[in-house]
Image: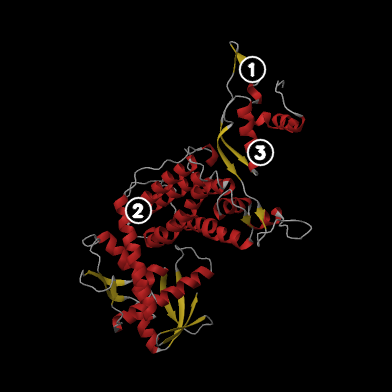
Amino acid sequence: MALKLDFSKQNSTLVVKIDGELDHHTSSYVSQKVDGELLKPQVKDVIFDFSDVNFMDSSGIGVIMGRGAAFKNVICLGHVLDTKGIKMSKHIGNVVDPWIMIDKYGADALRMWMYTVNQPGDSKNFDEKTVDEVVKKVFNLVSNILSFYEMYKDENIKPGKESNNILDKWIISKLNAFLKNGEKYLEEYRVFEAARLTRDFVNDFSTWYIRRSRDRFKSEDMKDRNNALATTHYVLMELAKYMAPFTPFFAESLYLKLKTESDPESVHLSNWPKGGEVDEEILQNMEVVRKIVSLALEKRMTADIKVRQPLSKLKIKDLKLKDKEEYTELIKDELNVKEVIFDENLETEVWLDTEITKELQKEGSARNFIRAIQELRKNKNLMPSDAVELLVETDGLGKEFLNSVLEEIKKPTNVSGLIFEENDGEELKIENYKLKIKIK
């Protein structure tokens, strides 16, 4: 490139820098003319650099050449340091081999760690424990959701978002808000915020929606069951599309396990997911539900009463959810209480009746027994549809108890019957009952 500028000798290095930065800035247009006019340079939407020196050079070159800005946005990347914030060096011996980390956690885990540990321009103190945390809070949770869905999925049920169930409407609104906010952040090149949204949404999806919907997946109410399956399928698909730029391999794997015949071959060929309508009232009401649940669980913890033990009633001071049965039912199920009462005269936000009657104690013992059976099923890798017979060794008191709650036990555990005989199974002590159980 011929550039007639009168630089002194000490500034000759600027000419070298112009040559070095030329391709980055305007090289493809320097000698091109249309109708005798030099083409305007193509201003880049965003550039990435590890040093502020280079992009400042680009800006300076643009001004000197009279060509204007080289870019609209810039993300200047910070350095990756060791755990103590010291620059990695072979001499010091604190270099972390990236290939070892990739083999152990996966390339996408390191990507997500980079995006979410702090802002792009901040230096990143590399601590393997924080990568493991990302794996557990994002990848493991999504994988568990997928596994749970695959356990109950029906190929005839397609992804959908039209359910009237309050949990389905909540997660769809949550998804839409997540997608809208994420797109807004990405349009503003706020990568950290856009990636962090993924972790927060996955947590809500797993710890609230899936956990509260577990019984729906095996419900005898086929409409409700199908709605849960369709909604979960839809949310997972949209999540895979959103995660694709951040975690391309994981998103592709997720997508391929979920896509239907009419979907594009790859998640990377799919359209970017667009957030739909967000029902703010549902989101606000569910926040109230979760706050009440959190406060009541603290009461249980203080009284040293596990959630598996049913209690008679919960009183709530806030009247926001009064006469909204779909929300109060969620509270009852989550807290395992028989009744929810609204009382604006309460001195505290919630009041929990912690008195345990004989009937409530019996029901709690049945739930503990059910949990023990579920653990046995899990250890044997049994599917929910696998019916089993259960060997039980106990005394007369235990036998009387089990016979009285047999019907309650059968449905959630898919136990076809109990056989009372000696066995070498797992020993249990539930309240005053001593038992030994084994799947036949």
Q: Which quadrant would the N terminus be assigned to in this image?
A: top right
Residue pictured at 55% horizontal, 54% vertical: 118
Front in this rendered view, residue 389 or 288: 288
> As shown in the figure, which amino acid type bears the numbered disc 1?
Gln
Q: CA distance from mark 1 to mark 3?
A: 25 Å
Name the quadrant containing residue 220.
bottom left
Residue pictured at 70% horizontal, 53% vertical: 99
Residue 389's mark? none
Tell me residue 344's x, y (percent): 21, 69
Q: CA distance from mark 2 to mark 1?
A: 56 Å
Front in this rendered view, residue 18 or 373: 18
For marks 2 and 1, give the one nearer the viewer.
Answer: 1
Task: Check disc 3 and report its element: helix, strand or loop.
Answer: helix
Residue 365 in sight in this render = no
Furthest-right residue in this view:
91
Name the quadrant containing residue 24.
top right
> As shown in the figure, which amino acid type bears the numbered disc 3?
Asn
Q: State the scheme by which the image is colored.
A: secondary structure
> As shown in the figure, which amino acid type bears the numbered disc 2?
Trp
The residue wearing badge 2 is: 170
Residue 32's mark? 1
In the figure, is residue 323 to the left or right of 302? left
Residue pictured at 42% horizontal, 77% vertical: 369
The residue wearing badge 3 is: 54
Q: Does the residue at mark 2 contact the one at mark 1 (Cβ under 8 Å)? A: no
Marked residue nearer the N-terminal end (3 or 2): 3
